[in-house]
Amino acid sequence: MAALKVDPNVKFIEELQASGGDSLKKCYQCATCSVVCPLSPEEKPFPRKEMIWAQWGMQDKLVNDIDIWLCHNCGECSDLCPRGANPGDVLASLRNMAYRSLAKPAVFGKWMSSSKYLPILFAIPALIYLIIWGFTTGLSIPGGEVIYGKVFPGDYTIDPVFGLVAVFVIFSFLSAISKLLKSFKESGQVPGEDAPSIWMSLYAVIKDQIVTHSKFKDCDSNQERYPGHLWLFYGFIALFVVTSIVAVGHWGGKLIGHEMHTPMALWNPVKILANLGAIALVVGLTLITRMRLNLDPSKQRSSFYDWYLLGVFWAVGITGILCEILRLAALPAIAYPMYYLHLIAVFMLIAYLPWSKLAHLVYRTVALAYAHQIGRKGLGE
């Protein structure tokens, strides 16, 4: 029998442990995790093989492994692990490391990996909008009715900045997705001749899994993840739709002579959708935050990636709601600084998206679509 030569990447093991997978050395390969996981395929199930590869420092195996994206970290495996190896945390740590390396420039991945870089992440948008504020009103508070466009006009401040940010994020994601798909193919998992197209698989995944978040319902250990993620998901979608409607109504309206103006009346359908989206966002954040705070640290822990995303979402939601309340209350001295903070929070959510945990919404969807295309499905499918 030929001997298998393993050349462990010790630095990779150390980085994985530092990213939240410090419990991986406790694993003694009992395979309980793969047996109890409701999402793991019967053939080459996860996460047992990932735990072996991680312990042996087999970086090449792990970076091309589609299964780290199929895991939803519901906690089933960690809850029942007899050694406290927390396989779910190890796979989450592997995804955290992937966030850093998939998208370019890599420096953003480095900044998103630790709380010590938070001042840099905050300072970038804070400086941008401080310069804009100084340019428009000399950092003064405008009098009269509170209209945020007096300080941050959409035409030549907000829209151009976020337009450039959107282009940057889209190209970063496209490059990262191309790299992700290439890694899957290099691992030897390629679609057969009769396989559906990637677009058909993507449609099936979005329809059957993403829209319903059905995978979360398959896990018994942490049922609170399901409603929390669902409320947050639809709240985010509602606010994205509102933002898109306002942008199209503004710029498209200019072309046809019927420009959409803000602020809108509270009974305007778009405003109603925005307020409903904000409520859904806060409900989802409350459920997920409570879940995170109540986790048993011996079985599952939260990483910086988890708290960064929750913190930024809370900042976006709370500052956005306060901006509306302060505007209606006609308190300009507080309203305009609050709007400044809101813009910073939105920038931190969107501009760093390809390197944050929210990127899993893109990367996991692509991975699930590719898994569907090659026929890699969980036991319940």
Image (cartoon, rainbow, N blue to C red):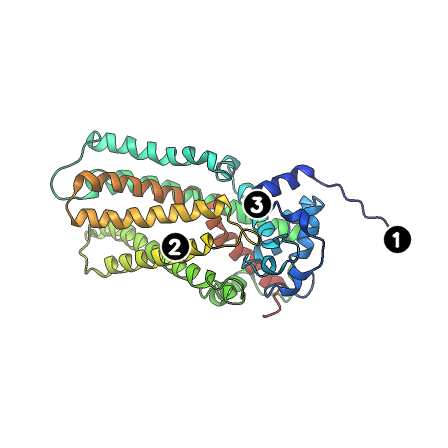
Point out the residue furthest to the bottom here. Answer: 380
Q: Secondary structure at mark 3?
A: helix
Mark 1 or 3: in front is 3
Who is closer to the viewer here, 357 or 14?
Answer: 14
Residue under label 2, please give it. Answer: 285
Point out the residue furthest to the left here. Answer: 144
The C terminus: image quadrant:
bottom right
Circle 2 residues within 10 Å: few <14, some 14–19, many ≥20: many
Residue at left 69%, top 43%? 57
Q: Amino acid at mark 1?
A: Met
Image-based side of 106 in relation to 188, left or right: left
Q: Position of residue 20 (x, y in %)?
A: 57, 45
How far apart are the alpha carbons under marks 1 and 2? 54 Å
**First-in-chain label (1 vs 2):** 1
Q: Secondary structure at mark 1?
A: loop
How far apart are the alpha carbons under marks 1 and 3? 37 Å
Q: Is residue 45 visible?
A: no
Who is closer to the viewer here, 31 or 216?
Answer: 31
Q: Secondary structure at mark 2?
A: helix
Q: Amino acid at mark 2?
A: Leu
Residue under label 1, please give it. Answer: 1
Residue at left 42%, top 63%? 227
Q: Position of residue 76 (x, y in %)?
A: 58, 61
Residue 141 against residue 47 in the figure, above or below? above
